[in-house]
């Protein structure tokens, strides 16, 4: 279980970070870290498809090291970020960068295909400026997560009743759901719930959620 908190002060003064660009470095690191959180563990292989501005400058602006650093669970200001490619190699995480010429919905867009064994996940992220990000695609489903709204990301086994158990717990603790996205790898395997809620005061709900049988991880972003 892990609590990750991003403060809105970033919207005003920009993030504390390693690197020359908040969009290309801090935002990229957050995208990588969110993808790791959704996946629930460090992947063995990563294919990174870069679009437009990211594709043109990903090496010079540190987008490559930032994305990999995030996948290694580093924050944007982690001093190890500059060595993330070396660390990934040492930890046997294979990374492939694929700069693309095609247009995207935003110039700072990246699609990450991560896998470990038979598990696979596809996530498209956008760095929208000032270190802020948006997740626009998850396993082929179009979504719109700004990560500026209080959000739970829950990885669990795909068994009957999981959605009801989670939503009932949130209802019992007076937490209202704004949006909810559910996807799974395949029947009976790992599944993901992404739940945006109306307010950030959640008390000990994260602890209660992780105690529900068949839940592997609960991450909360406010």
Image (cartoon, helix red, strand yellow):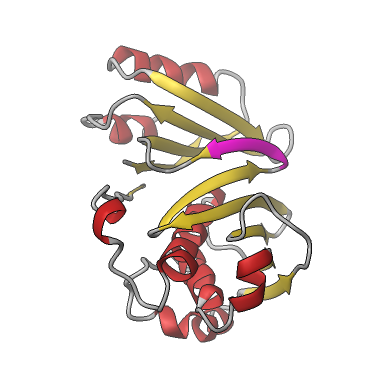
**Apparent side of residue 173 relative to residue 159 in the rendered image (left or right):** left
**Apparent side of residue 164 relative to residue 26 in the rendered image (left or right):** right
Which stretch appears magenta?
Answer: 140-144
Q: Residue at x 53, y 73 (%)?
A: 63
Q: Nearer the viewer, residue 10 or 72?
A: 10
Q: Residue at x 61, y 74 (%)?
A: 93
x, y (%) of residue 71? 51, 65
Q: Residue at x 37, y 31 (%)?
A: 209
- Height in image: 9 above or below 85? above
Q: Quadrant of residue 161?
A: top right
x, y (%) of residue 55? 66, 71
| Residue 49 located within the stretch drawn in magenta | no
- Height in image: 194 above or below 89? above
Q: Residue at x 42, y 20 (%)?
A: 177
Any part of residue 156 in sight: no
Q: Quadrant of residue 26?
A: bottom left
x, y (%) of residue 191? 61, 36
**Apparent side of residue 219 relative to residue 157 in the rendered image (left or right):** left
Q: Nearer the viewer, residue 27 or 119?
A: 27
- Height in image: 90 above or below 195? below
Total labels: the figure holds 0
The residue positioned farthest toward the right in the image shown: 102
Q: Main secondary structure of the magenta part?
A: strand
x, y (%) of residue 205? 29, 29
Any part of residue 165 in sight: yes
């Amino acid at each position: 279980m892990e609590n990750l908190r991003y403060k809105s002060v970033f919207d005003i003064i920009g993030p504390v970070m390693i690197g020359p660009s908040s969009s290309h470095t801090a935002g990229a690191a957050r995208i990588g870290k969110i993808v790791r959180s959704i996946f629930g563990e460090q992947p063995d292989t990563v294919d990174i498809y870069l679009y437009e501005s990211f594709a043109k400058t990903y090496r010079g602006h540190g987008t490559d090291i930032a994305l990999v650093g995030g996948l290694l669970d580093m924050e944007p200001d982690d001093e190890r970020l500059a060595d993330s490619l070396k660390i990934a190699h040492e930890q046997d995480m294979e990374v492939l960068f694929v700069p693309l010429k095609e247009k995207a919905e935003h110039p700072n867009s990246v699609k990450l295909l991560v896998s470990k064994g038979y598990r696979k996940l596809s996530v498209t992220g956008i760095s929208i400026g000032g270190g802020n990000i948006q997740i626009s695609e998850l396993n082929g489903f179009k979504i719109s997560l700004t990560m500026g709204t209080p959000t739970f990301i829950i990885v669990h086994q795909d068994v009957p009743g999981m959605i009801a158990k989670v939503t009932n717990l949130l209802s019992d603790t007076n937490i209202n759901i704004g949006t909810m996205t559910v996807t799974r790898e395949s029947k009976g395997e790992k599944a993901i719930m992404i739940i945006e809620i109306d307010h950030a005061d959640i008390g000990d709900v994260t602890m209660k959620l992780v105690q529900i049988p068949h839940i592997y991880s609960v991450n909360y972003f406010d």
